[in-house]
Amino acid sequence: MLAQSSVSAGRVGVNEVDGGADSGGSSGANKDNELVLQLTVQLAEAINLQDRDLIAQLHETIRCVRQFDNHEYVLHCFQLIIHKCCHTSKVLNSDIKLILNS
């Protein structure tokens, strides 16, 4: 994806120029990676412009976005654990019923 960035009065804007073939059906992880990529491009521009306030803001934004990605991963793992526990519980309950009925 090509992005056009503009910096004015300490604000950064990104306008999509060309979404490419896979911009419509990207998964959530790919979109998050794309967001980090766009923020990194903006960070490089801020470094070139020597805008220290914007550099600090972008570093913090990238850190927060990456931390949010990690929380989503932990939540997904927790959901998988709950699913496996429920499945194991059902299997054990059915085994107990078979033992009691025999």
Image (cartoon, grey):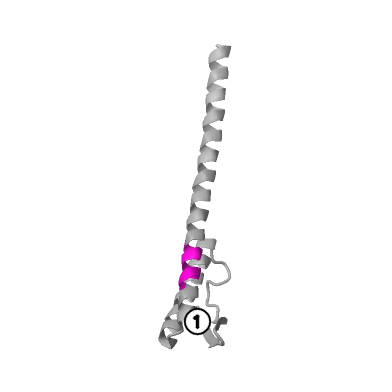
Q: Kindly state the secondary structure of the residue where label 1 is placed.
A: strand
Q: Which residues are magenta?
A: 59-66
Viewer-proximal residue among 52 and 42: 52
- Left or right: residue 10 compared with residue 45: right
49 displayed left or right of 8: left
Q: Pinpoint residue 22: horizontal percent, then vertical percent.
A: 53, 71
Q: Is residue 61 magenta?
A: yes
Residue 51 vertical placement versus 66 (above, below): below
Across and down, in percent, residue 98 comes to: 55, 17
Note whether residue 42 is visible.
no
Residue 78 image point, x, y percent: 51, 44
**Residue 56 in view, yes or no:** yes
- Is 26 situated above or below 5? above
Return the residue at label 1: 2
Give the residue at x 46% y 65%: 63
Closer-to-camera residue (96/55): 55
Q: Please tell me which residue is depicted at 48% across the width and 60% down the height of the picture.
A: 67
In this rendering, the count of numbered labels is 1
Question: What residue occupies the far front of the structure in this picture?
Answer: 53
The residue that appears at 45% across and 84% down in the rendered structure is 45
Decide: is 29 above or below 7: above
Three-letter amino acid code of the residue under disc 1: Leu
In the image, residue 25 lies at what x, y percent?
Answer: 57, 67
In the rendered view of the protein, which quadrant contains the C terminus?
A: top right
Question: Crowding near pointer 1: few (<14 within 10 Å), some, many (20+)?
Answer: few
User: Is residue 68 within the magenta segment?
Assistant: no
Q: Looking at the magenta stretch, what is its main secondary structure?
A: helix
Displayed quadrant of residue 11: bottom right
